[in-house]
Image (cartoon, rainbow, N blue to C red):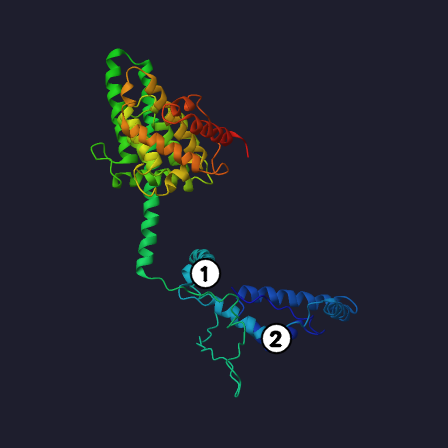
Amino acid sequence: KAYPPFFAPPPPCGNPGQSLRSQAVLRADTTHLHPQHWRLLTQRQSSRSHQGQNGSGGDRRLRGCFQDQVKKDPYAKLMTQREKEWVSRIQIMQLQSADPCLDDYYYQNYFERIEKRRSALDSQAERPKMERTRLITPQVAKLEHTYRPVQFEGSLGKLTVSSVNNPRKMIDAVITARTDIDETKEKQVRDKRRRTLYTIERTYSLLLQVQDLEKKYLQATESERVGILEQRNVKIIEMFANVHGKHGQSPDRSSEEQFNHIMCIRKGKRLISQILTLLSVDQATRLLFAIARGLPYFIRKDSQDEVLPCLLEPISLLLSRLPSAELTKLLQHLTCLPHPSASPPSPAPHFSSVVQNKFGLTLLYLILSQGERLQNSEKSSGLMEDNRWAELLFAVTRELLTVADTDLATPSLRPPNLLSLFSYYVDRQTLSLLDSKLQLSLKPR
């Protein structure tokens, strides 16, 4: 905490005591040294004076070495006296503290231990307690300076003068005025995304619990399996409520908002693909309808991730369990095609987005293929009598023929029974064109 000791050149030859007394008078910068530092300084100066007296020409030799050292020092005299005073003033200001016990803890603790040791020695020797000298920190008055830029008479504008106290601005950041409405909207978006991520993680935890219950079921006894199945059903209902709202709610657009946010996140899409096979047919169908209605939006959000194809396998298993009425509704949600009697026919951007995507076109093929199986089965012969199914097939055929070959995506698979399905509803010429169109869509581009 004291100034670094300043060791001057060796003193001139003569009486060491007189030399030290002259040094004490001339050296004003040592008045702030601690007594221990002062003792070390006097001992070193006396040892140098003794060396000069005992050796012949030692004083001149030491002085010559010191002068040679100054000449060789490349950093000598780089600072002016004013700069030295400026640095010294900064160091003195750093020594000042309103709470020395906190800011100068080690120095205060060091001298506290010394005082205890000396007081113990004084008490043993039965000597009167002496006041010990301590380092006195010089006090420098704090002056507050107000910066006033330099101005010249007759100059255009203000001149920028940079200094240590007023550095030049490197970046002129423009603060954009933001309203409370904008900040509120951004906060709502952030909060909504956080809630969605939390819902995904919570549903994954439920999925892991369901998997653990399935492992316990295989090792449990008959009496224990009933309770395990009940726990599993409760967890599955809770999973569905997390991603699509409560089980008792009607399947409207508002209840699908949370599901749409989940489908915009990669981890959320993989979560849906895993829980589709665990849900009941009714629950999984509601999720599938929501996917079909919002598919163009999900396709735009999946342009970089390309995770939607992971849903094809669980969806194909679900389609095999759907009745004909639900399959017709699903085709309507997926295509969003207008009624054939609409005049003039309006464009179908929803359908165009679906067939231009690999997942969308494959999903359309899977629905049509399952419709052909139901149509040929004896149990679901009513599909042939369903006018809405026939109208949708006519509309799908018309839209497929109007889409350019280069716009059709390459599907993941092409069921072999598609042409058999279309043969019930279109003539041979249209069927030939449709066959050519579907084959072109499978060629790699």
Judged from this view, the residue extending furthest toward the right is 56
Task: Determine which of the numbered discs, if any, sits on residue 21 in the image.
Answer: 2
- Looking at the image, residue 197 sits to the left or right of residue 132; the answer is left
Residue 202 on image: x %, y %: 32, 35
Say whether disc 1 or disc 2 marks the residue closer to the N-terminus.
2
Task: Determine which of the numbered discs, if any, sits on residue 120 in the image.
Answer: none
Judged from this view, the residue extending furthest toward the bottom is 153
Instruction: Say which element carries label 2.
Output: helix
Residue 36 on image: x %, y %: 54, 63
Above or below: residue 327 compared with residue 75 = above
Task: Determine which of the numbered discs, if any, sits on residue 104 in the image.
Answer: 1
Residue 178 on image: x %, y %: 36, 62
Snapshot quadrant of residue 311: top left
Residue 214 on image: x %, y %: 33, 20
- Looking at the image, residue 150 sits to the left or right of residue 380; the answer is right
At a point 51% along the width and 65% down the height, the residue shown is: 171
Q: Residues within 10 Å of mark 1 (few under 14, many from 20)?
A: some
Between residue 156 and residue 429, name the one nearer to us: 429
Above or below: residue 103 compared with residue 419 = below
Instruction: Say which element carries label 1.
Output: loop
Between residue 394 and residue 76, name the one nearer to us: 394
At a point 57% along the width and 67% down the height, the residue shown is: 38
CA gap between label 1 and label 2 equals: 33 Å
Above or below: residue 375 compared with residue 135 = above
- Looking at the image, residue 190 sits to the left or right of residue 150; the answer is left
- Mark in front: 1 vs 2: 1
Asked whether disc 1 touches disc 2, contact meaning CB atoms under 8 Å apart, the reply is no
Snapshot quadrant of residue 364: top left
Judged from this view, the residue extending furthest toward the top is 222
Amino acid identity at mark 1? Asp
Can the viewer see residue 134 in this picture? no
Task: Specify the quadrant that holds the C terminus.
Answer: top right
